[in-house]
Amino acid sequence: MKKFEEVKFNIGALKGISAKNIEEHLKLYAGYVKNSNLIIDKIGELMADPEKNMFVLGELQRRFSFEFNGIRNHEYYFKSLESGAKALSKDSKLKAAIEKFTPQTAGQAPSFDLWLSSFKLLAMTRGVGWAVLGYDKKTEQFVHIWIDEQHLGQLNGVPWILGIDMWEHAFVYDYPTSEKKKYVEAFFENLNWEVIEKNFIEAK
């Protein structure tokens, strides 16, 4: 099986998210890459006698899903912070689609800002995990996803448009856990919406 390699990201100075936090967070990402490759090697060794090692192999496969998603989730995350903050363009297909499919809430007309507020609420879900905007191609609609840890709750066949890491390691050097809302706001202040727009176009 082909080994995984670290992606190098072009992340400059951010507002509200320190270089220290990004540095430590990238080390964590590197750990997912390393551990995924170690698991691949170990599975290869144990397959010399799969019947004897079937229970260990089963647990390694469970662990692999955690480590693998740790790689991919973080690649979405760090990519969205590359090259500086960039706003959505006036003719954004993503914005138009979100406004079209966002249901009317409490008498308010659908709007991008209304959707963004609802997504930020998703990010404030108690626990560790990821808040994700996905796109279901079969029904041609957006879905909000809360993923526990790295892997519990991923929706099959639904590509990511946007994802924010809500594990404490994503903000612990900058904010106490009681102030994680400030981290959510900082994330969106630094977001490169051009990357998110590209994710949407590719997802369709």
Image (tube, rainbow, N blue to C red):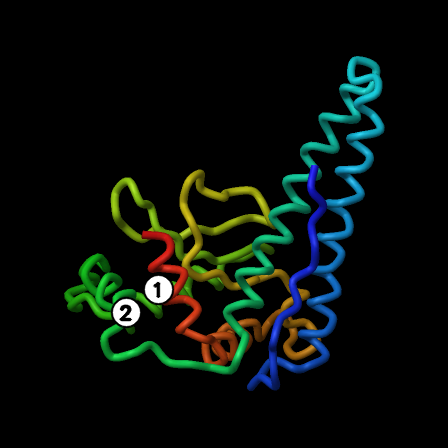
Q: Which residue is mark 1?
A: 118
- Depth check, front residue: 80 or 102: 80
* Depth order, front residue of 39/122: 39
Element under label 2? Answer: helix
Percent x, y for residue 164?
Answer: 51, 63
Residue located at (83% from left, 25% from top)? 46
152 displayed left or right of 3: left
Residue occupying image coordinates x 19% and y 66%: 110
Q: Secondary structure at mark 1?
A: helix
- Residue at 76% in and 19% down: 54
Check the image and report above or below for 186 versus 43. Answer: below
Marks 2/1: CA distance?
6 Å
Residue appearing at x 42%, y 40% in the figure: 157
Q: Is residue 142 above or below residue 81?
A: above
Along the horizontal axis of the image, is 25 left or right of 149?
right
Kind of residue indicated by mark 2: Leu
Mark 1 neighbour class, 10 Å CA radius: few under 14, some 14 to 19, many 20 or more: few
Q: Give percent across and percent down for residue 73.
A: 57, 55
Q: Which quadrant of the figure contains the N terminus?
A: top right
Q: Are marks 2 and 1 in contact (CB under 8 Å)?
A: yes
Task: Kindly identify the amino acid type of the residue bearing the numbered disc 1.
Answer: Ser
Lateral position of residue 5 relative to residue 114, left or right = right
Label 2 crowding class (10 Å Cα cut-off): few <14, some 14-19, many 20+? some
Q: Position of residue 202 (x, y in %)?
A: 37, 56
Q: Is residue 4 above or below residue 117?
A: above
Name the image quarter holding residue 31.
Answer: bottom right
Query: Where is mark 2, residue-wise?
Result: 114
Nearer-the-camera pick, 194 or 77: 194
